[in-house]
């Protein structure tokens, strides 16, 4: 374990070292995708340069090496979340992982069942459940939410107790607000009524690095590109018995045991859910990302990340007319805000002129925006490679943009 | 090219900085009278814009001219919309078909400040105008 040195970290991410519109890039869009350390880029290039082969079926040297490296990363993911390798399924992202579970429960749920979600979810953790409800006749309901978009955990636990859902699907941290969900009491309440639990870890997997055995959820989905890895890859953790009970999501090669012209039998999880040639280069790149993350001192990294976040929140709050919607007390490092009645699109466009990358819009959380009575917002999301200097550039530019509008 | 467009585009073209350019665009947007809320229907929304753009394109038979009105909930896009309106309003369908808005925007140095998604929104606005012009051209 090496101690956490922000200056050294910064140099590991080549993308951060550039100018946009003549200004140094200030990347505050890590909730959308994180930048990649050089080691991830190198491993991906190296794979295509000298190691490219398909996995699992070849007896030749390159194929065997590719298979070994590929399966090693599955184990590394399992180590990261402190679960077993056979409980990790590769998908093309967190969205596909949720779809996989939703599809896999088609024969399990009935018209008597309720699926419980929350109003702060990303569309990816809403729409697949709408589809499952429509297919099975199950009812889809949402947990109550305070006016400021935080949960009253006791009230939520009561709702779980009385609703007795078949499944609770909830995010580990809000992609729009950064708010961290207090999952433990919710999962405990869900377990008490025999509900399955799925946690959307697209934001939480990097910033909160959960021990999934302790968290005790049945499913946890994650996205590699939001964890320093390549795009086009994500995964699903499933408690083995819950995972293996799901129907296959896609069928074809790799996932079968025996095929005749009229019928087939399927392998057990995780192979059952991995039809076709996987994203091998992506997996190897993600392996490098995890290796990079796992040697950093987690405690120091978290403290540093929070330090930069609070510094940014304080500076932002000092600007007259700024309204912050994020819960600053329990947050992964995301600031959701607006300036007076200005449209976030205008400010995001002007900020780009200063080299500041933020996001504007509804952040794929339209129900949350409706709850907050917003048409959209600006979102500045931080990661451990951001510095207080980034914050200073951001705040200075924001003030200049505001002057342009006023 | 309409006289209005020549006047407004000159100001943008001669901006000394990108900030000045955006300021001119936003000022131009302010000159557009707002659409009545009753006209801001989903049918009038232009697809492909990150911000909301409502637009009506009609053909005035007696004048043989296109009439375009519109509004947007953002200042910058409203300014760009005003620019498009200045570019096309009052022209005959044949004249409309001869003007490539994207090229005009490029001349003003606006495209470099507009990302693909934002640019597509502009394309969608122009397409709506061009589609009607094509139907009406003789």
Image (cartoon, coloured by chain):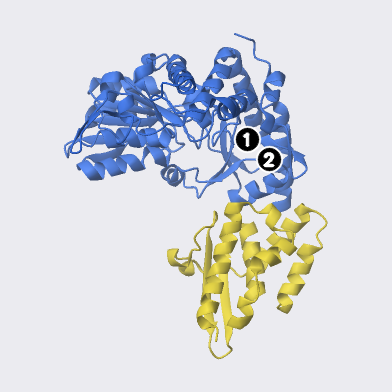
Chain colours: A blue, B yellow
Confirm or deny contact between disc 1 and disc 2 (CB under 8 A): yes
Residue at disc 1, secondary structure: loop
Residue hosting label 1: A28
x, y percent for residue A119: 39, 39
> What percent of the width, then of the height, locates residue A277?
41, 33
* Foreground of the two, A41 or A256: A256
Q: Is residue A298 above or below residue B76?
A: above
Q: Which mark is residue A356?
A: 2
Front in this rendered view, residue A321 or A75: A75
Q: Secondary structure at mark 2?
A: strand
Where residue A172 sits, quadrant-wise, is: top left
* Residue lying at 51% horizontally and 69% vertically, measured from the top left: B36
Report in which chain the residue with disc 1 lies: A
Look at the image and tell me whether residue A398 can be seen: yes
From mark 1 to mark 2, how far is it between C-alphas?
7 Å
Q: Residue at x 52, y 65 (%)?
A: B54
* Residue drawn at the location 23% of the way across and 40% of the way down: A139
Q: Is residue B35 visible?
A: no
């Amino acid at each position: 374990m090496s101690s956490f040195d922000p200056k050294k970290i910064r140099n590991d991410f080549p993308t951060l070292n550039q100018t946009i519109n003549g200004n140094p890039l200030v990347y505050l869009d890590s909730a959308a995708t994180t930048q990649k350390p050089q080691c991830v880029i190198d491993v991906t290039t190296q794979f295509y340069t000298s190691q490219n082969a398909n996995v699992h079926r070849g007896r030749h040297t390159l194929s065997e090496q590719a298979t070994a490296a590929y399966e090693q990363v599955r184990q590394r993911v399992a180590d990261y979340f402190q679960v077993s390798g056979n409980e990790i399924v590769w998908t093309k992202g967190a969205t596909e992982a949720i779809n996989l579970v939703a599809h896999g429960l088609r024969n399990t749920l009935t018209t008597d069942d309720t699926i419980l979600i929350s109003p702060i979810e990303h569309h990816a953790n809403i729409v697949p459940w709408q589809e499952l409800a429509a297919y099975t006749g199950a009812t889809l309901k949402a947990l109550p939410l305070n006016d400021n978009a935080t949960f009253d955990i006791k009230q939520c636990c009561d709702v779980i107790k009385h609703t007795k859902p078949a499944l609770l699907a909830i995010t580990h941290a809000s992609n729009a607000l950064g708010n961290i969900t207090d999952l433990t009491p919710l999962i405990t309440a869900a377990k008490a009524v025999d509900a399955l639990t799925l946690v959307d870890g697209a934001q939480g997997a990097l910033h909160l690095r959960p021990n999934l055995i302790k968290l005790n959820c049945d499913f946890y989905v994650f996205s590699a590109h939001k964890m320093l890895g390549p795009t086009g890859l994500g995964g699903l953790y499933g408690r083995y018995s819950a995972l293996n009970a799901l129907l296959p999501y896609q069928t074809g090669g790799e996932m079968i045991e025996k095929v005749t012209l009229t019928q087939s039998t399927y392998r057990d999880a995780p192979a059952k859910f991995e039809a076709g040639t996987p994203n091998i280069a992506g997996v190897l790149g993600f392996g490098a990302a995890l290796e990079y993350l796992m040697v950093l001192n987690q405690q120091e990294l978290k403290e540093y990340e929070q330090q930069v976040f609070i510094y940014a929140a304080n500076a932002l709050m000092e600007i007259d007319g700024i309204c912050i919607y994020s819960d600053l007390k329990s947050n992964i490092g995301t600031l959701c805000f607006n300036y007076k009645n200005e449209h976030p699109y205008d400010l995001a466009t002007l900020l780009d002129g200063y080299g500041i990358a933020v996001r504007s819009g509804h952040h794929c959380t339209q129900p949350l925006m409706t709850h907050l009575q917003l048409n959209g917002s600006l979102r500045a999301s931080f990661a451990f490679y951001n510095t207080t200097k980034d914050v200073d550039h951001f705040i200075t530019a924001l003030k200049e943009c505001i002057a342009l509008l006023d | 090219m309409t006289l209005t467009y020549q006047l407004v585009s000159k100001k943008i073209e001669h901006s000394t900085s990108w900030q000045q350019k955006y300021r001119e665009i936003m000022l131009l947007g302010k000159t557009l009278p707002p659409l009545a809320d009753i006209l801001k229907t989903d049918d009038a929304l232009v697809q492909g814009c990150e911000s909301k753009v409502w637009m009506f394109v009609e053909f005035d038979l007696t004048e043989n001219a296109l009439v375009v009105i519109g509004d947007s909930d953002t200042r910058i896009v409203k300014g760009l919309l005003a620019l498009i309106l200045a570019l096309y309003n009052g022209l005959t369908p044949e004249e409309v078909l001869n003007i490539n808005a994207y090229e005009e925007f490029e001349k003003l140095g606006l495209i470099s400040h507009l990302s693909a998604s934002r640019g597509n929104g502009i394309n969608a606005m122009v397409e709506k105008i061009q589609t009607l012009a094509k139907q009406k051209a003789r």
